[in-house]
Image (cartoon, grey):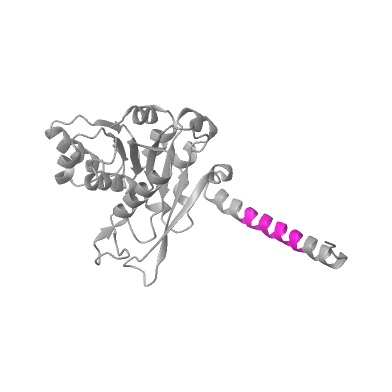
């Protein structure tokens, strides 16, 4: 089949325009990531997930987005842990990248991927909501579910699609995500092998539901955003029932104690990966 000179020129122009457009998009993406302090190479390791949902605070459906990190190499007949990460209030929105700050970005680095091969699920909470906010889901009664339920649905779906070990599902989060972690284990206490709520808080009346669960709790004793009493009351309630949660109260620690917990050593990760149901 002959290609006319005109058609060839048109094809080359079309290809050049698309390459320029793609380059411009990538440049804009990198600018956004740089502004948020994110490593673009690490972000591109995450698969994008999106669930259209009707939220009470909006008149139309908006996406509930998430990112999924996979092991660099998935061995045949091998199952891998899943870490569920819940971000703080400052990362809410719809860009599906802000929530990758801190632990998700760190877990995408080659050294940690090699030492801790796992899946990591990082949902992004919509603006003006928190992890316990009510949602209106398709075929569900009004306000019968919340974001916690939707995260549970995500976990179930990706566990069916990927090589995830159901005995090694972990959850952690900081600030608003710390509250979300306490809420998640109260609502689904048998789903997780371990949990690490950081500078958050929960309802002491719920601790009997997860008294069996291994916990690594962290809070700074000089936190001016979420008072350290929020973690202390949960620990006291657990100990009153005979539980032995690991509690690390950082002397002089401010609200951003997650930076030290996630970033300066592998102690938390070593502990998490030792836990299984």
The picture places residue 36, in percent across and down from the top left corner, at: 52, 50
Residue 114, relative to residue 139: is it above or below? Answer: above
**In this rendering, does residue 9 appear at all?**
yes
Q: Residue furthest bottom?
A: 59
| Span shown in magenta | 14-28
Q: Main secondary structure of the magenta part?
A: helix
Percent x, y of residue 105: 49, 41
Q: Nearer the viewer, residue 44 or 36?
A: 44
Q: Position of residue 224 (x, y in %)?
A: 31, 45
Front-most of residues 177 and 20: 20
Judge by depth and name the residue closer to the eye, 194 or 75.
Answer: 75
Considering every residue shown, the one lying at the far front of the view is 1
- Asked if residue 244 is among those painted magenta in the image, a careful observer would answer no
Q: Compared to 77, does 59 lie above or below?
A: below
**Which quarter of the image is occupied by the N terminus?**
bottom right
Q: Residue at x 71, y 57 (%)?
A: 19
- Residue 231 position in % (x across, y down): 24, 40
- Does residue 144 appear to the left or right of 273 in the view shown? left
**Quadrant position of the C terminus in the picture:** top left
Nearest the eye: 69 or 202: 69
Was residue 18 drawn as part of the magenta stretch in this picture?
Answer: yes
């Amino acid at each position: 089949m002959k290609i006319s000179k005109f058609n060839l020129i048109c094809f080359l122009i079309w290809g050049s325009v698309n390459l320029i457009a793609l380059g411009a998009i990538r440049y804009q993406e990198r600018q956004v990531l740089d502004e948020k302090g994110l490593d673009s190479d690490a972000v591109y390791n995450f698969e994008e997930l999106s669930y259209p949902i009707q939220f009470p605070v909006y008149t139309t459906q908006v996406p509930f987005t998430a990112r999924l990190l996979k092991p660099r190499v998935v061995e045949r007949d091998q199952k891998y842990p899943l870490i569920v990460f819940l971000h703080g209030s400052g990362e809410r929105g719809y860009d599906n990248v802000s929530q990758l700050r801190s632990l998700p970005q760190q877990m995408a680095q080659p050294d940690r991927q090699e030492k801790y091969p796992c899946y990591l699920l990082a949902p992004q909470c919509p603006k003006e909501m928190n992890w316990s906010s009510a949602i209106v889901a398709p075929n569900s009664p009004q306000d019968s579910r919340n974001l916690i339920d939707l995260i549970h649905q995500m976990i179930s779906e990706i566990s069916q699609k990927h090589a995830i070990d159901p005995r090694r599902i972990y959850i952690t989060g900081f600030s608003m995500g710390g509250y979300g972690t306490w809420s998640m284990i109260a609502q689904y206490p048998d789903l997780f092998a371990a949990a690490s709520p950081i500078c958050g808080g929960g309802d002491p009346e719920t601790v009997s539901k997860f008294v069996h669960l291994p916990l690594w709790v962290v809070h700074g004793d000089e936190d001016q955003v979420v008072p350290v009493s929020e973690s202390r009351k949960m620990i006291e309630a657990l100990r009153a029932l005979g539980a032995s949660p690991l509690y690390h109260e950082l002397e002089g620690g401010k609200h951003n104690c997650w930076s030290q917990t996630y970033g300066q050593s592998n102690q938390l990760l070593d502990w998490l990966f030792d836990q299984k149901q």
